[in-house]
Image (cartoon, helix red, strand yellow):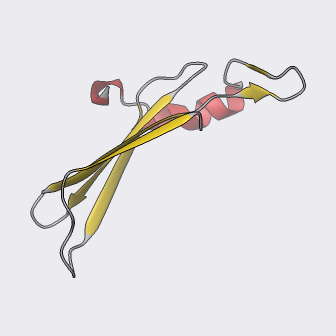
Amino acid sequence: MLETRNIELALPRAGDEVVWLGADIAIAIVPPVTALAFVKATGQMLSIHDSVGVAMDLDARRAIPIPPSIRAAMEPHYLPEFA
């Protein structure tokens, strides 16, 4: 991960079931990922977590396009409407 941000909106109460939903919102050299946490029973939003990663060529020490095998694994989770 290059960068990660978390915005806390509320805290769950004891016994609340917390659900996290995450999505790849772009498939690019630097792909952003967003995850939302909320209370299952009420739908109350608890937090928003954004992160940005990068595929690296460790020998060349530079970002590279996402390899096809990794890209294929990301595509089912690609939800640009969460951008």
- Image quadrant where residue 58 sits: top right
Which one is in front, 82 or 9? 9
Q: Residue at x 63, y 28 (%)?
A: 54
Quadrant of the rendering where the N terminus is positioned: top right
Which one is in front, 41 or 34? 34
Q: Residue at x 20, y 74 (%)?
A: 16
Q: Is residue 24 above or below residue 30?
A: below
Quadrant of the rendering where the C terminus is positioned: top left
Q: Count the numbered circles shown.
A: 0
Percent across and percent down for residue 55 are 69, 28
**In-image side of 83 versus 67 (left or right):** left
- Image quadrant where residue 62 sits: top right
Percent across and percent down for residue 51 are 47, 37
Q: Is residue 28 above or below residue 15?
A: above
Percent across and percent down for residue 2 are 59, 33
Q: Residue at x 40, y 28 (%)?
A: 25
Percent across and percent down for residue 42 are 9, 63
Q: Is residue 44 above or below residue 63?
A: below
Q: Residue at x 20, y 51 (%)?
A: 9
